[in-house]
Image (cartoon, rainbow, N blue to C red):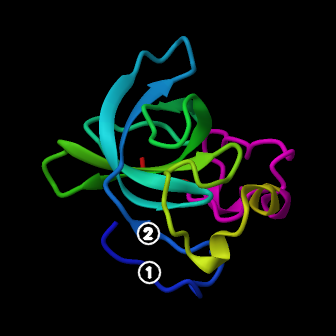
Amino acid sequence: MDSTENPTDSGRRSTRIRAQIPLRVTSLDPAISFSESGHTLVVNTQGCGVRLSRALEPGLAVSLDELPARQGVTARIANCVPLGTGGHWWMVGIALDEPGNVWGIHPTPADWGSEAAIATAAGASSPAPSVAKEGEWPYRRFSSRGEFHPGKR
């Protein structure tokens, strides 16, 4: 854990923390064969940013394994942007289906609260964000869990 960013970023419900936490990202869609070990670059209670060697489509359901605090966490790809110009690495934003401190961060920032409070505030029982149709303006999509980024194509 290196440092924290400004907890008052507009639209953000919990402080982002720079942290390199090892994990495995695996596609839950049988049509998309993908599983890769990597590490987080930033984390918060709603998700993380991960550096991966392949681009993943926003909306793809994934499982996060090999986490320090929990196993088998489900999530969705929120966005995906290339890192640099070579196309060898991608910054993949991942939104947890059930927000919480799955990262094992201790002590936690004050705005992370308890897992029960986070899940209630984020509406964990709400459905996942819809995936855009071809040609649809991406900024009309909103997640019940807060900020949503459509990613670049």
Please name whichever residue, 79 or 112, is drawn nearer the observer in this view of the structure: 112
Farthest residue toward the left?
86
Farthest residue toward the top?
30
Please name whichever residue, 148 or 134, is drawn nearer the observer in this view of the structure: 148
Query: Alpha carbon of mark 2 to alpha carbon of mark 1: how far?
Result: 6 Å
**Circle 1 is placed at which residue position?**
5
Specify whether 56 is left or right of 142: left
| Label ID, residue 17 | 2
Magenta segment: 120-149
| Label ID, residue 23 | none
Pointers 2 and 1 in contact (C-beta within 8 Å)? yes
Q: Residue at x 64, y 69 (%)?
A: 112
Picture coordinates of residue 30, whole percent (x, y):
55, 11
Residue type, mark 2 in image: Ile
Q: Residue at x 75, y 61 (%)?
A: 118
Query: Do we see residue 151 in this rendering?
Result: no
Secondary-structure class at tag 1: loop
Picture coordinates of residue 54, whole percent (x, y):
30, 35
In this rendering, is residue 98 above or below 1?
above
Mark earlier in primary sequence (2, 1): 1
Q: Main secondary structure of the magenta part?
A: loop
Specify whether 126 is left or right of 131: right
